[in-house]
Image (tube, rainbow, N blue to C red):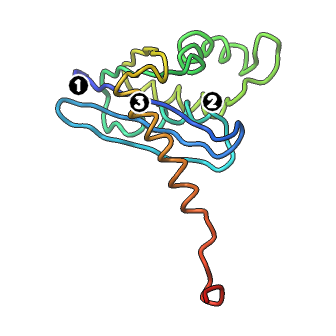
Amino acid sequence: MNDRVYIYTDGACRGNPGPGGWGALLQYKNKEIELFGGELDTTNNRMELMAAIRALEALKHSCLVTITTDSLYVLKGISEWLPTWIRKGWKTASKAPVKNADLWRLLAAAQDKHQVEWRWIKGHAGHPENERADRLANRGIDELLLSTQKQPYASDRT
């Protein structure tokens, strides 16, 4: 496990909830891979999580990974809150169910295959890779919305 991969992730939502997108930029040696996707009815936090999940799932073998996110929700969740949630049966300190537990479980499983270092960076502050991840997340929304628009029927055309 000596391959080092750098991942930059972001999520976006137009309305919260609303149509959302996630984006990830993966850098390995001299290669870059851009990933993105979207969901019609989601939240920004879910898209932030999905970006990290999909990026880690895209790796074909165990790697040393540095993930940079602008989401304190993701950073604190994975590095501080997750062990307690698991120990308490996916309940918060107030005994409420953990929000987005389905995605937290996926992220924990995806992370377990790698040695991951998590980093936080302020969003929309000019960090080039974070800005690219943001554009990818918005592209995920744009392409989702384009693909779900009603296609005209032959009888609708004049």
Whether the residues at callouts 1 and 2 have beta carbons within 8 Å, the answer is no
| Mark 3 element type | helix
Q: Residue furthest front?
A: 158
Amino acid type indicated by mark 1 = Asp
Q: Quadrant of residue 148?
A: bottom right
Q: CB under 8 Å between callouts 1 and 3?
A: no
Q: Which residue is mark 2?
A: 45
Label 2: state its secondary structure: helix
What crowding class fits label 3: few (fewer than 14 Cα within 10 Å), some (14-19), or many (20 or more)? Answer: some
Q: Nearer the viewer, mark 2 or mark 3?
A: 3
> Label 1 neighbourhood size at 10 Å, few (<14), some (14-19), many (20+)?
few
**Comes first in the chain, label 1 or label 3:** 1
Q: Which is nearer the eye, 144 or 155?
A: 155
Q: Which residue is mark 1?
A: 3
Q: Nearer the viewer, mark 1 or mark 2?
A: 2
In the rendered structure, which disc, 2 or 3, sits on the residue that comes first in sequence? 2
Residue flagged by tag 3: what amino acid is it? Glu
- Image location of residue 87, percent across then percent down: 67, 13
